[in-house]
Image: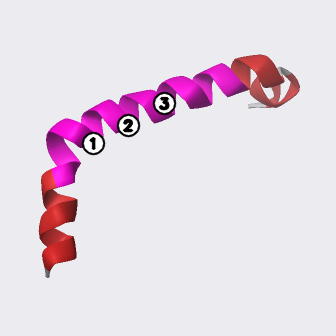
Amino acid sequence: MVILETMSPVRGWIQFLVVAFLRLYDKGETTRARRHALVH
């Protein structure tokens, strides 16, 4: 992963895409489980 460490802009974009994907996935799948867990 040396290339990702040296190229900070690319690394930033990858992190941004991963976070965005996780947020969109969270809305559909994990949000229910988290709310259910928080209730208990």
Q: Quadrant for residue 3, please give it.
A: top right
Kindly identify the amino acid type of the residue bearing the numbered disc 2. Leu
Residue bearing the label numbered 2: 22
- Judging from the image, what secondary structure is the residue with disc 3 in? helix
Q: Residues within 10 Å of mark 3 (few under 14, many from 20)?
A: few
In the image, farthest residue toward the right: 6
Magenta region, main secondary structure:
helix
Q: Position of residue 16 (x, y in %)?
A: 57, 27
Q: Position of residue 38 (x, y in %)?
A: 21, 73
Q: Which residues are magenta?
A: 12-31
Label total for image: 3
- Which residue appears at 22% of the width and 62% of the height? 34
Q: Is label 2 in contact with label 1 (beta carbons under 8 Å)?
A: yes
- Judging from the image, what secondary structure is the residue with disc 2 in? helix
Relative side of 17 to 37, left or right: right
Relative side of 27 to 4, left or right: left
Q: Position of residue 40 (x, y in %)?
A: 14, 82
